[in-house]
Image (cartoon, rainbow, N blue to C red):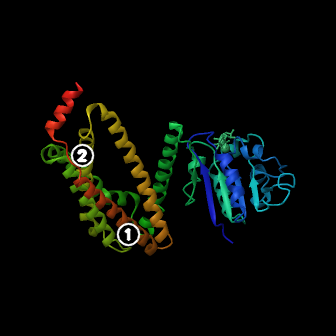
C-alpha cells in the first residue's frame, strides 16, 4: 500500500523546536496510522538523544551496511510504552557519530534515501530536517506536497528565516516545474527552456516600456487610478490566458494576454510606492514602507502557495489534460483575486496635494 503522506518538519532557524514537535506529532499521528519518523538531521542526530530506547540499526546501517530502510526502524520498548499505545510508531535514527558522507550526503546518497523513504511500508512518514537552507534540506522539501514549518513568532529573525525557507522552496519548486523535464514544456508543448523563456518575453519585457510612462502619468492622473487600471488589465490578461490555454493551443493565442498582463504589472508597480507613502504623514513613511514591503512579500508567498494548492487539487502532472486543467483553474482564481484588487485600488481616496503640504508643514 502506498504511503499516505510524507511530511517534512523544517525551520529556517535552528533550535526552534523542530525535533520536539516532530516526535510529539509522530506519536500523535501513530494513533491514526503506522508512522515512521526519520531523523534527517544526520549531523547531530537529535532523535536518538531524545528517545531513550536501545537502537540496533540506524542510517549508518542503511548507507554503509546496505540494510533495507525498513530494517532500520526502531520501536519503543516496554519501558517507554508499557501499554503498547504507540505500537504504530517507529523511528529511524541518524548515525551515532559524524560520518562525513552521511552527514553531508551527496546526490547518490540522497537519491537512494528518497527512493527508500518512498518504498517504506507505512502510512505516514515524518522527516525531522536540520535547520537552515542547505541543499540537504531544500532538496527534500519540494517532493512532498505538505510540510510543517516551525518558527517562533516572538523571535523576528526566526520568522524572517521561515519566510526565507518558504521562498527557497517556491523557487526550487518553480525550477523543477520549469526545468527541461517540466511536464508543461516537454509533454504539453514540447519547447526547450530557452524557447519557453523567449516566448514569455512579451509579458516580462513590458515593464521596460510601460513603467516610465506610468511614472510620468502617475502625478497627472493619480497613482490609484493607474493601479486600478493595471490590475484590471492583469485580471483580463489572466482570464484570457485561462480561457485559451489547452494542451494544443498555439503560442499566438497567448501573446496579446501576455502583453496586457505585462503592461498591467508595470502600471501597478510604478505608482504603488508613491501612493502608499503619500497616504501617510512624513514621520510614518518608514512604517508604511516596511508594511508595504512585508505585505507584498506575504502576498507573493501566499498567492503562489494557494494557487499551487488549487493546481494540485483539481489537476496535476499526470497528463497534459490534468496539467492544463489545474493551470487554468488556478489562473482563473488568480485573475478573480486581481480583479478584486482592481476594485480596491479604484476605491483608494487620494490625499489632496494641499492636505499633504499642510501635513508636511506640521511635521517640520
Ligand atoms: N514549545 C516549547 N516550549 C519550550 N521549550 C521548547 C519547546 N519546543 C522545544 N523546546 C526546547 O527548545 C530546545 C530546542 O528544541 P529542538 O531540539 O526540538 O529544536 P530543533 O529546531 O529541532 O533544533 P535543531 O535546529 O538543533 O534541530 C530544546 O531544549 C527543547 O526542549
Ligand atoms: Mg532538531
Vertical position of residue 268 compared to residue 290: above or below: below
Residue at 19 percent across and 44 percent down: it is 215
Residue at 65 percent across and 58 percent down: it is 114
Instruction: Give the total of numbered labels.
Output: 2
Residue at 46 percent across and 60 percent down: it is 177
In the rendered image, the residue lying farthest to the top is: 364
Q: Position of residue 40 (x, y in %)?
A: 67, 49
User: With 296 as the anchor, is 349 left or right in this view?
Assistant: left
Q: Nearer the viewer, residue 291 or 112?
A: 291
Q: Which quadrant of the view contains residue 243? A: bottom left
Mark with earlier residue (2, 1) = 2
Q: Which quadrant of the view contains residue 8? A: bottom right
Q: Can you tell which mark lies on residue 328?
A: 1
Q: Position of residue 161 (x, y in %)?
A: 52, 41
Q: Position of residue 301 (x, y in %)?
A: 43, 52
Regarding residue 297, the answer to whether it shows in the image is yes
Residue at 38 percent across and 73 percent down: it is 247
Vertical position of residue 132 compared to residue 56: above or below: above
Gap in angstroms between the C-alphas marked 2 and 1: 28 Å
- The quadrant the C terminus occupies is top left
Mark 2 residue CB less than 8 A from any atom of ligand 1: no
Q: Nearer the viewer, residue 71 or 278?
A: 278
User: With 211 as the anchor, is 175 left or right in this view?
Assistant: right
Tag 1's secondary structure? helix
The crowding category of the residue bearing disc 2, from other C-alpha atoms within 10 Å (few below 14, some 14 to 19, many at least 20), is many
- The quadrant the N terminus occupies is bottom right
Q: Which residue is mark 2?
A: 270
Q: Can you tell which mark lies on residue 77?
A: none
Amino acid at each position: 500500500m502506498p504511503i499516505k503522506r510524507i511530511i517534512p518538519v523544517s525551520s529556517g532557524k535552528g533550535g526552534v523546536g523542530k525535533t520536539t514537535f516532530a516526535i510529539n506529532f509522530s506519536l500523535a499521528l501513530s494513533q491514526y496510522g503506522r508512522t515512521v519518523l526519520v531523523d534527517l538531521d544526520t549531523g547531530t542526530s537529535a532523535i536518538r538523544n531524545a528517545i531513550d530506547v536501545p537502537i540496533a540499526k540506524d542510517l549508518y546501517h542503511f548507507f554503509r551496511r546496505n540494510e533495507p530502510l525498513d530494517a532500520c526502524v526502531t520501536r519503543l520498548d516496554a519501558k517507554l510504552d508499557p501499554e503498547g499505545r504507540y505500537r504504530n510508531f517507529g523511528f529511524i535514527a541518524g548515525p551515532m557519530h559524524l560520518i562525513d558522507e552521511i552527514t553531508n550526503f551527496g546526490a547518490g546518497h540522497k537519491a537512494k534515501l528518497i527512493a527508500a523513504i518512498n518504498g517504506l511500508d507505512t502510512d505516514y512518514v515524518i522527516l525531522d530536517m536540520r535547520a537552515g537552507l542547505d541543499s540537504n534540506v531544500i532538496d527534500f522539501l519540494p517532493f512532498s506536497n505538505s510540510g510543517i514549518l516551525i518558527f517562533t513568532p516572538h523571535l523576528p529573525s526566526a520568522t524572517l528565516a521561515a519566510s526565507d525557507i518558504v521562498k527557497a522552496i517556491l523557487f526550487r519548486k518553480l525550477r523543477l516545474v520549469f526545468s527541461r523535464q517540466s511536464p508543461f514544456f516537454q509533454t504539453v508543448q514540447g519547447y526547450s527552456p530557452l524557447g519557453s523563456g523567449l516566448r514569455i518575453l512579451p509579458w516580462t519585457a513590458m515593464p521596460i516600456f510601460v513603467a516610465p510612462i506610468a511614472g510620468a502619468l502617475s502625478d497627472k492622473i493619480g497613482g490609484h487610478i493607474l493601479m486600478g487600471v493595471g490590475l484590471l488589465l492583469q485580471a483580463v490578461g489572466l482570464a484570457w490566458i485561462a480561457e485559451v490555454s489547452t494542451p494544443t493551443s498555439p503560442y499566438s493565442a497567448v501573446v496579446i494576454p501576455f502583453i496586457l498582463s505585462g503592461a498591467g504589472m508595470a502600471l501597478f508597480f510604478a505608482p504603488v510606492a508613491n501612493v502608499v507613502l503619500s497616504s501617510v504623514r512624513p514621520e510614518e513613511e518608514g512604517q508604511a514602507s516596511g508594511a508595504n514591503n512585508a505585505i507584498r512579500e506575504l502576498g507573493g508567498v501566499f498567492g503562489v502557495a494557494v494557487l499551487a494548492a488549487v493546481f494540485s487539487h483539481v489537476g496535476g502532472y499526470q497528463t497534459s489534460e490534468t496539467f492544463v486543467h489545474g493551470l487554468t483553474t488556478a489562473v482563473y482564481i488568480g485573475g478573480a483575486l486581481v480583479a478584486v484588487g482592481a476594485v480596491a485600488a479604484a476605491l483608494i481616496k487620494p490625499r489632496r496635494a494641499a492636505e499633504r503640504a499642510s501635513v508636511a508643514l506640521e511635521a517640520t
